[in-house]
Amino acid sequence: MNEQTSNIRKSEIGERLKSLHPGVSRLQFAKELGVSDSTLGNYERGDRTPDVEFLVRLRERFGIDIHWLLTGEEKQGSTQLVVRSEGDFVTLPRYEARASAGGGLIPKQDISEYFSVGRDWLRRNLPAWAPPNALVGILEGSGDSMEPTIRDGDVLMIVQDVEWRIVERGGVFVFSLDDERLLLKRLQVLISGDLKIISDNPAYAPELIPFADIEHRIRIHGMVFFAGGKPRPLAR
């Protein structure tokens, strides 16, 4: 590897490092990792390649895929669903899957990157029913059928592992229909037990899933509690 290639590689590693803590200062992130601000600055600017001890700490504390950090490539079969918590912020996985507010897309579970958000902010904005250690993930919405509530390209924050009793309360959910489509819709359980799939955009007609078909046709992946270019509370 020549010097120019090496410098490009270090710069790319630095950019991926910076992407891990949006909204969290470099100084705070450095403290969480037990290194000085200047050391982290060297890594993020591409002046130095992170040492082994730093990489191990990054992996152990926040579950970061070191292969991705060093190469930009995801490991095959990556399905990690754990939210890592340390100090004043948590690191959330963002998935490649796009939750469709239109025709739907085939689900993919690969983690594309990680985002850090303030732990206090997350605690304040999680639904009241969600436990403090709730699994939270980030997806991107696509399509226009949930406008004006959710727009095409909005970032979605979801609580995963949602029990059916939560679905019965109603809300906006990410779910699979017939194990083929990953959808973003409002769900309403009717008195009859049937499930009504609702688009907030009145141009789209609702869909009804009979009670007898729910178990083998619907798989709930999570409930959306924030959405937008910048997170914002959903209207209920």
Image (spheres, rainbow, N blue to C red):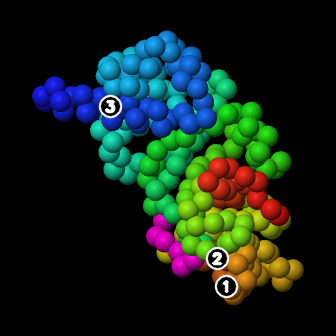
Gap in angstroms between the C-alphas marked 1 and 3: 46 Å
Q: Which residue is mark 1?
A: 204
Label 3 Cα crowd, 10 Å radius (few <14 / some 14-19 / many 20+):
some
Indicate the secondary structure of the residue bearing disc 3: helix
* Main SS category, magenta section: loop
Determine whether 123 is above or below 32 in the image: below
Give the mark nearer the N terminus: 2 vs 1.
2
The percent position of residue 1, horizontal first and vertical second, equals: 13, 30
Q: Which residue is mark 2?
A: 145
**Among the 4 quarters of the image, the one containing residue 52:** top left
Gap in angstroms between the C-alphas marked 3 and 2: 40 Å
The percent position of residue 148, horizontal first and vertical second, equals: 71, 70
Assess whether residue 123 is covered by the magenta stretch.
no
Determine whether 152 is above or below 65 in the image: below
Q: Which residue is mark 3?
A: 11
Going 72% across and 52% down the picture, which residue do you hit? 232
Of residues 56 and 224, the one drawn nearer to the viewer in this rendering: 224
Give the mark nearer the N terminus: 1 vs 3.
3
Question: Residue 112, which numbered label?
Answer: none
Which quarter shows the C terminus? bottom right
The percent position of residue 84, horizontal first and vertical second, equals: 58, 34
Indicate the secondary structure of the residue bearing disc 2: loop
**Among the 4 quarters of the image, the one containing residue 192:** bottom right
Residue 107 seen in this snapshot: yes
Going 33% across and 35% down the picture, which residue do you hit? 12
**Magenta region:** 102-107
Determine whether 161 is above or below 80 in the image: below
